[in-house]
């Protein structure tokens, strides 16, 4: 902004006689220009009024004083109230220049102190002008207009008095010069935007012999505006001490209410089901493992529930408490068979099964229903729960469930594994590839060319050329009731209408042998052997420590711990021995073993325990069982 504009405001206030007084004012302004160029960091002694200048022309001295004051303190010019800056918000370019200037000043200060450059926080640094203060600008312009009107009124009054003196010099009784400038004290103007969260301040300098701004005046203005909180006392003192006129500052700042953070749901299970192929150790991919259904175990994490935070109260500059809004509670996507933990922090599965996302909720189902055949569109299935297949299972696929497997159609050369029961509505033709594993029982329309491993019983209408290992009983007495070929091993009994065939196809039956029970016993025997070896080593250590004449407290503690371990292993050994004994009794109990059939064709071999019976002729309504002498006897049923 040019120097000619800088005096516009006070030139207007200080208009004088169009002849002599106007010329004197312009001459003073020209003399002030070189003085204004010499800026200093601190106000100099020239701030004080010069007596000779006052006597000569107080009006001119006032103008020189304010003009120089603005330049020396690097403040906005004296016509600020009528400039664009006061009427409109500062532009982005002007704001950028202000920021760059502040940054350079900070860097220079840091370099002088030998420290690192610190970034200036515009909101905390009162030196950064506040943009977008149009309402306050209008308020200040209105206040300035009142001052101008008052000065103009005094001007007119002085002009009339001067004119009166010239017209009637003989009547003039007072020879003192007429001063058209009224004495106006420094003023403080405050502005509070809507919400009372901050207050802006701007001080006007005194005019004439008016009183300069005092701390009491500023405090009274704040008190009158009922501003009691968040006052920047340091800034208030600085405005008074350094006479920071014509500048807008933020004098008070309230603490806004901080809303609490909303609660949040962090999902650990994907909502969408998608194909997922996995490589084995050799890098091969089985494209039958589609992983369409995601298994989940009881207690497994589904979602983390982040509770909402409480809002923090704030306070406006008038001391009013602003209530902080609490965060909103999130909607937990809890569906069937899911449960929120007692502490409310997690959503977990209530049971084993597969998890799905339906109707904006996670659901856990322990029944997997496949509406159709198991083919390449479905792939292999490994499920925690029951599987219901409304169709056939084609060759090469594997169905595995921790619960039951129910198949309404036919099973080809596939592998079916169930933790409990297997039920096949249309039967199974394994083509010498199919396998059944059941933790409990198997029920099928027929079984042909398949391997069957069952902990419980088998019930079927026909069994042809199968390799069967059953800890319970085999019943082929319904329907055709044919049991032909293969090797049949049963822990208890075999019942059929017809065993063998007229084509003399050999059939072998082994009873009293419990493969699954025997495997369980063998595992426990291995565990028992390991426990015995551990006990022997512990006993040797105990004996060694006890043989010492004296033991340190540390070794005494070690001995105590070893004795406790040996006692624990002793109890485990006793328990395992008892369990093995029970299993051996089950394995060696042949008293309930028998084979019953309406007709048996040779060649057939029936083995119960260690005794066998070779049948060479067709026999009707027969029963094979073990006598008290340990021999297999053919009896009539």
Image (spheres, grey):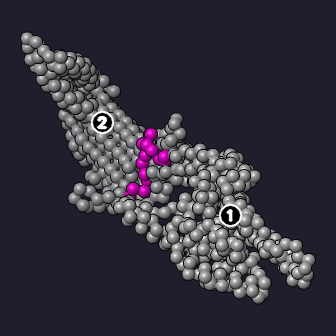
Look at the numbered disc 2 and give the secondary structure of its residue. strand
Q: Nearer the viewer, residue 455 or 118?
A: 118
Q: Position of residue 309 (x, y in %)?
A: 57, 45
Q: Which residue is drawn at 30% across and 24% down?
A: 592
Look at the numbered disc 1 and give the secondary structure of its residue. strand
Q: Position of residue 242 (x, y in %)?
A: 59, 61
Q: Nearer the viewer, residue 386 or 33?
A: 33
Look at discs 1 and 2 and give the one toward the viewer.
1
Q: Where is residue 395 in the image (x, y as percent from the top left)?
A: 33, 57
Q: Residue at x 75, y 52 (%)?
A: 224
Q: Which of 588 and 17 is in front in this view?
A: 17
Q: Which of 56 and 42 is in front in this view?
A: 56
Q: Is the residue 36 above or below the residue 598 in the image? A: below
Highlighted range, magenta: 290-304
Query: Residue 359, which numbered label?
Result: none
Q: Is the residue 603 above or below the residue 104 in the image? A: above
Q: Position of residue 584 (x, y in %)?
A: 23, 24
Q: Which residue is identified by label 1? A: 203
Q: Say left or right for 607 vs 79.
A: left
Q: Do the residues labelled 1 and 2 touch (CB within 8 Å)?
A: no
Q: Residue at x 28, y 46 (%)?
A: 451
Density class for disc 2 (Cα within 10 Å; few <14, some 14-19, many ≥20) is many
Query: Residue 470, which numbered label?
Result: 2
Q: Residue at x 60, y 68 (%)?
A: 47
């Amino acid at each position: 902004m040019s120097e000619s504009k800088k005096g516009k405001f006070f030139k207007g206030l200080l208009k004088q006689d169009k002849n002599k007084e106007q010329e004197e004012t312009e001459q003073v302004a020209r003399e002030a220009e070189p003085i204004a160029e010499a800026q200093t960091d601190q106000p100099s002694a020239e701030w004080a009024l010069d007596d000779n200048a006052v006597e000569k022309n107080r009006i001119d001295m006032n103008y020189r004083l304010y003009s120089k004051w603005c330049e020396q303190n690097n403040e906005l010019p004296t016509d600020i109230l009528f400039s664009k800056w006061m009427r409109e918000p500062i532009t982005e370019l002007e704001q950028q220049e202000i920021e760059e200037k502040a940054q350079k000043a900070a860097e220079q200060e840091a370099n002088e102190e030998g420290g690192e450059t610190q970034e200036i926080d515009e909101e905390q640094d009162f030196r950064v002008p506040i943009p977008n203060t149009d309402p306050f600008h209008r308020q200040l312009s209105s206040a300035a207009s009142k001052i101008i009107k008052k000065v103009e009124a005094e001007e007119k009054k002085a002009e009339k008095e001067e004119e009166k003196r010239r017209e009637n010099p003989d009547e003039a009784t007072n020879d003192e010069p007429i001063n058209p400038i009224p004495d106006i004290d420094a003023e403080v103007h405050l502005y509070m935007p809507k919400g009372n969260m901050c207050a802006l301040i701007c001080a006007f300098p005194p005019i004439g012999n008016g009183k300069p701004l005092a701390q009491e005046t500023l405090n009274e203005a704040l008190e009158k505006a009922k501003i009691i909180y968040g006052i920047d006392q340091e800034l208030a003192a600085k405005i008074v001490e350094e006479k920071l006129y014509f500048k807008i500052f933020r004098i008070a700042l309230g603490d806004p209410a901080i809303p609490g953070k909303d609660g949040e749901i962090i999902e650990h299970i994907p909502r969408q089901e998608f194909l997922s192929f996995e490589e084995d150790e050799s890098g091969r991919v089985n494209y039958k493992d589609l992983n369409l259904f995601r298994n989940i175990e009881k207690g497994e994490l589904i979602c983390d529930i982040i509770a909402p935070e409480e809002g923090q109260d704030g306070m406006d500059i008038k001391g009013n408490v602003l209530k902080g809004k609490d965060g909103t509670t999130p909607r937990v996507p809890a569906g069937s068979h899911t449960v929120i933990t007692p502490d409310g922090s997690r959503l977990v599965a209530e049971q084993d099964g597969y998890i799905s996302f339906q109707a904006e909720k996670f659901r856990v189902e322990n029944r997997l229903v496949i509406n159709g055949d198991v083919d390449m569109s479905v792939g292999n299935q490994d499920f925690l729960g029951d599987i219901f297949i409304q169709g056939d299972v084609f060759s090469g696929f594997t169905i595995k469930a921790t619960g039951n497997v129910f198949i309404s159609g036919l099973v080809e050369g596939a592998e079916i594994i169930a933790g409990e029961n297997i039920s096949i509505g249309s039967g199974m033709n394994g083509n010498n590839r199919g396998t059944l594993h059941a933790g409990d029982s198997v029920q099928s329309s027929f079984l042909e060319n398949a391997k069957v491993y069952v902990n419980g019983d088998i019930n079927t209408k026909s069994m042809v050329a199968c390799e069967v290992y059953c800890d319970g009983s085999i019943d082929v007495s319904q329907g055709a009731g044919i049991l032909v070929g293969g090797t049949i091993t049963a822990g208890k009994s075999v019942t059929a209408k017809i065993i063998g065939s007229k084509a003399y196809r050999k059939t072998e039956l082994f009873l009293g042998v419990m493969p699954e029970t025997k495997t369980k016993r063998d595992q426990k025997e291995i565990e028992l052997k390991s426990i015995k070896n551990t006990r022997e080593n512990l006993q040797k250590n105990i004996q060694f420590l006890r043989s010492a004449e004296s033991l340190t407290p540390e070794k005494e503690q070690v001995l105590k711990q070893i004795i406790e371990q040996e006692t624990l292993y002793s109890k485990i050994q006793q328990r395992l021995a008892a369990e093995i004994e029970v299993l051996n009794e089950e394995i060696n109990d042949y008293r309930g073993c028998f084979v019953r059939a309406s007709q048996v064709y040779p060649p057939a071999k029936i083995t119960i325990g260690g005794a066998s019976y070779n049948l060479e002729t067709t026999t009707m309504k027969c029963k094979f069982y073990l006598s008290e002498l340990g021999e297999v006897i053919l009896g009539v049923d």
